[in-house]
Amino acid sequence: MSSEVMEFMVWLVERVARKFFDGNKRLAYNQLKATGLWEHYVRHYETSHTLNEEYLLVDIKECLERHG
């Protein structure tokens, strides 16, 4: 994984942790992995890193709700 992709994913974990998991980055990371979102955002980095934070968080919230 390139450093650009890793920086984006760290940024994403931090935002997800703050929004949905009371700042718990480990839990946020685990949920992104468990739902397949981690792989999705890595695979589609070229477009996903251009999306704004609000859009990404809405997308992630919907996925988390579908997965319980």
Image: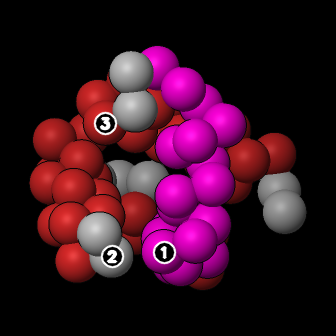
Q: Report how far apart the C-alphas of labels 3 and 2 lie in the structure.
A: 14 Å
Q: Is 60 above or below relative to 21?
A: below
**Residue at the image point whose x is 21% and y is 66% from the top:** 65
Q: Quadrant of the C terminus?
A: bottom left
Magenta stretch: residue 37 in it? yes
**Residue at the image point whose x is 48% and y is 74% from the top:** 35
Q: Which residues are magenta?
A: 23-41
Q: Report how far apart the C-alphas of labels 1 and 2 lie in the structure.
A: 7 Å
| Front of the two marks 1 and 2 | 2
Which of the two labelled residues, at mark 1 and mark 3, occupies the earlier sequence position? Answer: 3
Q: Which residue is mark 2?
A: 67
**Residue at the image point whose x is 54% and y is 26% from the top:** 24
Question: Is the residue marked by circle 1 packed among few (<14), some (14-19), or many (20+) residues within 10 Å?
Answer: some
Q: Amino acid at mark 1?
A: Thr
Which of the two labelled residues, at mark 3 and mark 2, occupies the earlier sequence position? Answer: 3
Q: How is the image coloured?
A: secondary structure
Q: Are marks 1 and 2 in contact (CB under 8 Å)?
A: yes
Q: Which residue is mark 3?
A: 20
Work out which residue is located at the far front of the displayed protein and give it. 68
Q: Is 17 above or below relative to 38?
A: above
